[in-house]
Image (cartoon, rainbow, N blue to C red):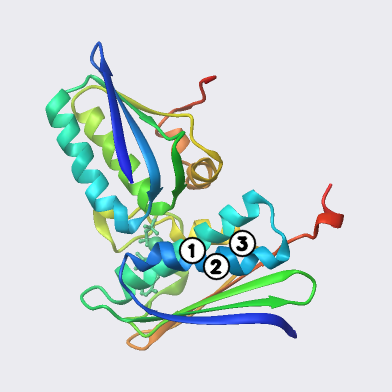
């Protein structure tokens, strides 16, 4: 599908950049004229994806995170978040609600939240190589809203 | 994020404001631990009316707090979550574990 607009962002996986990534995604999404609720959903999904890179992909280092946002035809927002960290051994298991390797500080709900807040979630991962999460959410134009 | 407090008759109300993500969560848990030690409340109310944003890091924090309260025989519930935190709480399904009450303000 043709991209109408895009931005690419690369930043170090410091937890202080979680808020920055959310704000950048929200600012980019504004061109689709989303509702407050849609904006909240987009920020939440981005926060989950970026936090996963920071806490899971690079547990002991500050690694590189790349976020690419695209507006596709028909008001489709696509968000890709990529890391070059440890990767995920068993993807199916990782995506199950409550599954976590993160102990008490995590709830194992990140993928579940991304899945339910976005229309589509695709995860590609190679152990030792890294992980890419691609999410899509259609934002209805004002005219289409009830 | 900031935490305000009110205490009366064994009930501590913690007002969480700002944004609660992984960056803020550890400090928030430490602050809450300190407050629980200081006040030794029977019940804990976590007021989320001033929390603009929360992700799954907040879910883990809320679950840990409710576990702590249960250990001491107390109760905990969430009050007045704003729209975005409410959606995260509903999606995570913790309203089955921790009651959510909406009070008219
Ligand atoms: N980018 C990543 N790199 C490596 N492992 C990952 C990555 N993202 C997720 N995982 C693995 O998948 C598991 C599930 O992720 P998910 O986001 O659903 O839950 P969580 O991060 O453990 O907890 P929560 O998101 O509720 O704080 C993680 O515990 C981790 O093992
Ligand atoms: Mg997660």
- For the residue pair B56 and B13, the one nearer the viewer reads as B13
Identify the subunit bearing mark 3: A
Q: Which image quadrant for residue A125?
A: bottom left
Q: Position of residue B94 (x, y in %)?
A: 44, 40
Sequence-earlier tag: 2 or 3: 2
Tell me the number on the disc at residue A145. none
Read off the residue under disc 2.
Answer: A25
Q: Nearer the viewer, residue B28 or A45?
A: B28
B102, above or below A78, in the image: above
> Label 2 vs label 3: CA separation?
14 Å
Dot 1 and dot 2 within a common chain: yes
Q: What residue lies at 69% left-to-right and 67% top-to-bottom?
A: A31
Residue at image position (72%, 65%) is: A32
Image region (quadrant) for ligand 1: bottom left
Element assignment for label 1 = helix
Given the image, what chain letter belongs to the residue carrying mark 2?
A
Q: Residues within 10 Å of mark 2 (few under 14, many from 20)?
A: many
Q: Is residue A95 visible?
A: no
Q: Earlier in the sequence, mark 3 or mark 1?
A: 1
Q: Which residue is mark 3?
A: A118
């Amino acid at each position: 599908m043709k991209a109408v607009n895009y931005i690419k962002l690369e930043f170090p996986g410091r937890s202080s950049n979680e808020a920055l990534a959310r704000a950048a995604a929200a600012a980019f999404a504004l061109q689709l004229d989303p509702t407050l609720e849609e904006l909240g959903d987009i920020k939440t999904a981005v926060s989950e994806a970026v936090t996963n890179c920071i806490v899971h992909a690079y547990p002991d280092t500050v690694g590189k995170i790349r976020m690419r946002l695209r507006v596709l035809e028909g008001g489709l927002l696509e968000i890709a978040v990529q890391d070059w960290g440890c990767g995920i051994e068993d993807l199916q298991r990782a995506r199950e609600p409550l599954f976590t390797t993160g102990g008490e500080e995590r709830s194992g709900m990140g993928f579940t939240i991304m899945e339910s807040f976005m229309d589509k979630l695709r995860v590609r991962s190679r152990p030792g190589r890294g992980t890419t999460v691609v999410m899509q959410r259609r934002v209805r134009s004002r005219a289409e809203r009830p | 994020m900031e935490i305000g407090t009110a205490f009366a008759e064994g009930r501590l109300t913690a007002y969480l404001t700002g944004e609660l993500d992984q960056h803020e969560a550890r400090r928030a848990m430490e602050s809450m631990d300190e407050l629980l030690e200081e006040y030794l409340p029977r019940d804990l109310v976590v007021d989320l009316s001033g929390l603009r944003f929360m992700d799954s890091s907040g879910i883990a924090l809320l679950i840990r707090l409710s576990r702590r309260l249960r250990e001491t025989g107390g109760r905990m519930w969430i009050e007045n979550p704003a729209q975005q935190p409410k959606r995260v709480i509903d999606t995570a399904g913790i309203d089955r574990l921790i009651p959510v009450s909406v009070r008219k303000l």
